């Protein structure tokens, strides 16, 4: 989301990277985005974006918090080793999709499946241990008074033996020398980019197959944003991780992802290859700044 822009004494908060002529208010974006929902993608169209059978699928999801329904009859398909980015106006339900996959919401209808296995009713611990789904929070979730090594060991809290967690931690240090050099330092002294790397790495300790990544670029300087996306690309391309992300920087998210979904008011409005959505004039006007 763009920084608030002042024009004629007024403060405008909006999306995009353009000047005042291209900046739209959040309310305007939400209203105009409603028009994208006229032709919701079919299951056949969603399946066509994945090679072969989907690794993770959502069918007819209805979910929310308490009695508040946020997501309405939502479908999703993503293949093994693919990346999918969710974009849309504020309040569209993007993070709620991730929460629903991981078991943080009240699901009243629909199903979440991994390799054809229904995992809808699994709690978060079981989602991680038995379904191989890890969730990386958008907020600063490191333990600042614990060392880098201790933070990583916390990622193996579901392992039966502490030796397993230690071995997994050593594998992380072998992969990321930047963390290995700081293994005995308090996590609170790390830079923003290093903290984000630590959060991602902690999720890797359980060797998940699916990474749910909520706003990977939030609060980071541009140089660290590039670093984080390079890390995610390596995990997808080199280790075959399936990545589903929410990203407020729509351009960055779509450039990275194989598939893009546009959510509006808790419903799927558009779906396509990431580069196709980047070239879509409506997506560009509403979410990319021109």
Image (cartoon, grey):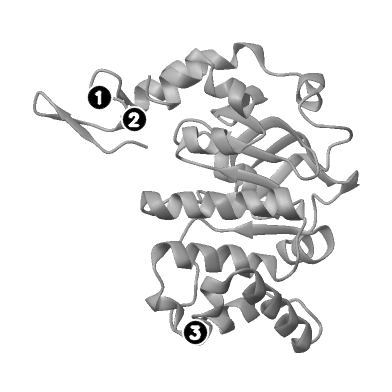
Tell me: 252 left or right of 161: left
Mark 1 packing: few (<14 Cα in 10 Å), some, or many (20+)? few
Q: Compared to 21, does 103 lie above or below?
A: below
Residue depth check, mark 3 versus mark 1: number of the one nearer the observer: 1
Q: Are marks 3 and 2 in contact (CB under 8 Å)?
A: no
Q: Residue at x 79, y 59 (%)?
A: 132
Rendering coords of residue 172 (x, y %): 66, 72
Pick whichever of labels 3 and 1 is earlier in the sequence. 1
Residue at x 74% of width, y 69% of height: 206
* Marks 3 and 1 close (CB-CB < 8 Å): no
- Asked where in the image residue 2 lies, by quadrant, the reply is top left
Q: Earlier in the sequence, mark 3 or mark 2?
A: 2
Residue 9 placement, left or right of 91: left
> Where the N terminus falls, by quadrant?
top left
Q: Residues within 10 Å of mark 3 (few under 14, many from 20)?
A: some
Marks 3 and 1, how far apart in space? 43 Å
Residue 140 visible in image:
no
The secondary element bearing badge 1 is classed as loop
Q: Secondary structure at mark 3?
A: loop
Whether 229 is drawn above or below 50: the answer is: below
Q: Which residue is mark 1?
A: 19
Rendered residue at 66%/44% (across/down): 244
The Cα atoms of the two marked residues, 3 and 2, are separated by 38 Å
Residue 270 screen position, x and y as percent: 62, 21
Residue bearing mark 3:
146
Residue at the disc numbered 2: 17
- Residue 109, quarter of the rendered image: top right
Can the viewer see residue 16 in this picture?
A: yes
Q: Mark 2 to mark 1: distance in Å?
A: 7 Å
Residue 261 image point, x, y percent: 62, 29
Give the image location of residue 119, x and y in percent.
Answer: 83, 51
């Amino acid at each position: 989301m763009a920084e608030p822009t002042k024009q004629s004494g007024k403060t405008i908060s909006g999306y995009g990277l353009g000047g005042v002529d291209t900046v739209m208010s959040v309310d305007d974006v939400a209203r105009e985005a409603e028009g994208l929902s006229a032709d919701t993608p079919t299951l056949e169209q969603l399946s066509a974006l994945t090679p072969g059978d989907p690794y993770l699928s959502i069918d007819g999801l209805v979910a929310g918090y308490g009695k508040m329904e946020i997501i309405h009859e939502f479908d999703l398909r993503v293949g093994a080793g693919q990346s999918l980015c969710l974009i849309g106006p504020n309040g569209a339900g993007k993070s709620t999709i991730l929460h629903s996959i991981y078991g943080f919401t009240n699901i009243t209808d629909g199903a979440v499946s991994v390799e054809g296995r229904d995992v809808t009713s699994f709690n978060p611990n079981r989602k991680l241990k038995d379904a191989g789904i890890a969730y990386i929070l958008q907020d600063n979730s490191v333990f600042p008074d614990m060392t880098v090594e201790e933070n990583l060991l916390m990622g193996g809290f579901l392992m039966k033996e502490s030796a397993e967690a230690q071995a997994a931690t050593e594998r992380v240090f072998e992969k990321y020398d930047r963390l290995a050099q700081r293994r005995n330092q308090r996590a609170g002294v790390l830079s923003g980019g290093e903290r984000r790397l630590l959060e991602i790495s902690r999720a890797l300790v359980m060797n998940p197959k699916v990474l749910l990544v909520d706003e990977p670029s939030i609060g980071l300087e541009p140089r660290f944003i590039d670093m984080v996306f390079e890390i995610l690309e390596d995990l997808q391309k080199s280790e075959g991780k399936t990545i589903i992300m929410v990203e407020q920087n729509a351009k960055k998210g779509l450039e990275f992802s194989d598939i893009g979904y546009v959510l509006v008011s808790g419903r799927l409005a558009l779906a396509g290859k990431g580069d196709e959505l980047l070239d879509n004039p409506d997506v560009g006007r509403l979410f990319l700044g021109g």
